[in-house]
Image: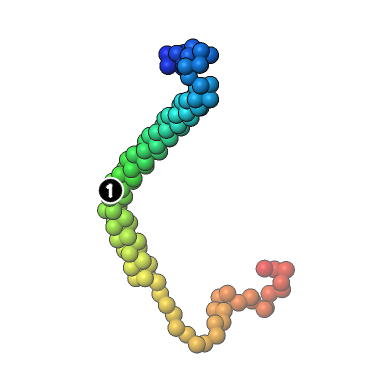
Amino acid sequence: MRSEHDDRAEKLAPSGASPRARLDQRRAALETAKQQVLSAQANLENTRAALAEAEAAREELTVLQRQLGELGPEEQRLRAQRERAALDLEDRTVVMHSTALWTRPSWMRANTSRPASAC
């Protein structure tokens, strides 16, 4: 991608109208500028990609917040259901306070009058 300026400078250089060192210096400056432009374009593309990711993340966050808002009443319903179940269990639980040792009732005791093989 040579410009007309480069072509003209090359034509003038051999005739002595433009010193060769100055021509090389201008070419180097032009090449540096081209590299800077390419680098800036790459940075711009990277920034655009990062922006697209951030926008997608924002949209996802909005969806999650809406879902969370919709789950609020469901959470309250489940908490109430759990509390009712706990109260129901508490109402049905019989607590026996006894300090005596437990012994088998007579109907659970083995009959000692029968031989063990008869059971």
Percent across and percent down for residue 59 are 32, 40
Coordinates of residue 73 in the picture (x, y in percent):
27, 53
Taking the image as shown, residue 115 lies to the left or right of residue 27, namely right
CA neighbours of label 1 inside 10 A, class few (<14), some (14 to 19), many (20+): few
Q: On the image, which quarter does residue 89 sit in? A: bottom left
Quarter occupied by residue 85: bottom left
Considering the numbered disc 1 on the image, is that residue within a helix, a strand or a loop? helix
Q: Nearer the viewer, residue 39 or 87?
A: 39
Q: Residue at x 55, y 85 (%)?
A: 101
Residue displayed at 54% across by 82% down:
102
**Residue 17 visible:** yes
Q: Nearer the viewer, residue 16 or 25?
A: 16
Residue 105: quarter of image = bottom right
Q: Is residue 22 above or below residue 76?
A: above
Quadrant housing the C terminus: bottom right
What x and y, as percent, mark residue 47? 40, 37
Name the residue at 31% across, 63% down: 84
Q: Is residue 67 visible in the rendered structure shown here?
A: no
Report the residue marked by disc 1. 70
